[in-house]
Amino acid sequence: MRYFKLIIIGINLLGYVVSAQNNTNEMTTWKLELLTTYDFLNTSYGTNNGFIAKGKYNLYHSKHFSFYTGIMHQNSYINERKNKFTKHTRGYTTDVGLYALAEIVYYPFRQRNFFMSIEPFVGATYLRSKGSLKIPAYGVSETYKNTYVYFNYGVSNSLGYRFGEISVQLSLWSSLKGFWDKGRFRPGDFDSRIFAALGVGYSF
């Protein structure tokens, strides 16, 4: 009988700890995210490596919704040694952006573990290309260096799962400038980038 009472007390304490942990998760104010990115449409220019870092502040939360606002830094590096358009280009392109964002998160189930989100963003992108073009058969040997800063905007869609303060997510990050720029549809160009992203988040 004594051991039975201890078991009951232990179960109650465990339930209290889990409940307190869930309440703590509900009241988190900040969220940091780091994602690796892959540009699956722009592969003709070369190999792609990149990341996205975000810092968000929770302005509102309810049973099924949360609303965040924050900033995002996006960086990608393209090595153009494997350019499919020409075998004579040696160089790289960096694509760096800083954006303000707003995010609506939806939790479809009673437990706020699985989530879906939509995240519009707006800001500026700095594009820099540098390299050389050499065609010995025609006596061509040129170096190039180009920079371009432009207003950028788009949206990110995510599916994720929370493990306490830690979350994992799969995202599709889309820059809409190239799609909506005077009717041009250029999914392969730099000002209409689409990234697949996988990353982690930490809430506190």
Image (cartoon, rainbow, N blue to C red):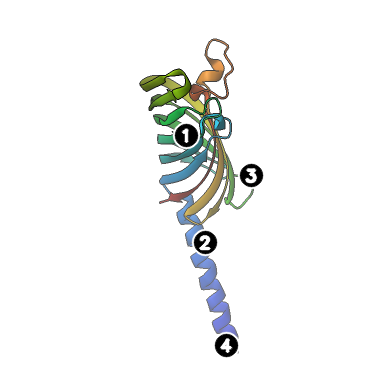
Label located before the other in sequence (2 or 3): 2
Query: Disc 2 marks which amino acid?
Result: Ser
Relative height, residue 169 to residue 186 (above, below): below
Mark 1 and mark 4 lie on one chain; the one further toward the N terminus is 4
Q: Where is residue 65 in the image (x, y as percent from the top left)?
A: 55, 40
The residue to which callout 1 is attached is 81
* Rendered position, 115 above or below 72: below
Mark 4: few/some/many CA within 10 Å (<14, 14-19, 20+): few
Hey, what amino acid is under mark 4? Tyr
Marks 2 and 3 close (CB-CB < 8 Å):
no
Q: Mark 4 points at which residue?
A: 3
Q: How far apart are labels 1 and 2 at the CA level?
A: 55 Å
The image shows residue 121 at horizontal and vertical percentages of 46, 28
Q: Distance from label 1 to label 3 (Cα)?
A: 45 Å
Q: How far apart are marks 4 and 3 (CA)?
A: 40 Å
* Residue type at the position of mark 3: Pro
Q: What element carries label 3?
A: loop
Badge 3 is on which residue? 108
Between 38 and 21, the one nearer to me in the picture: 38
Whichever of labels 1 and 2 marks the residue nearer the N terminus, that label is: 2
| Label 2 residue SS | helix
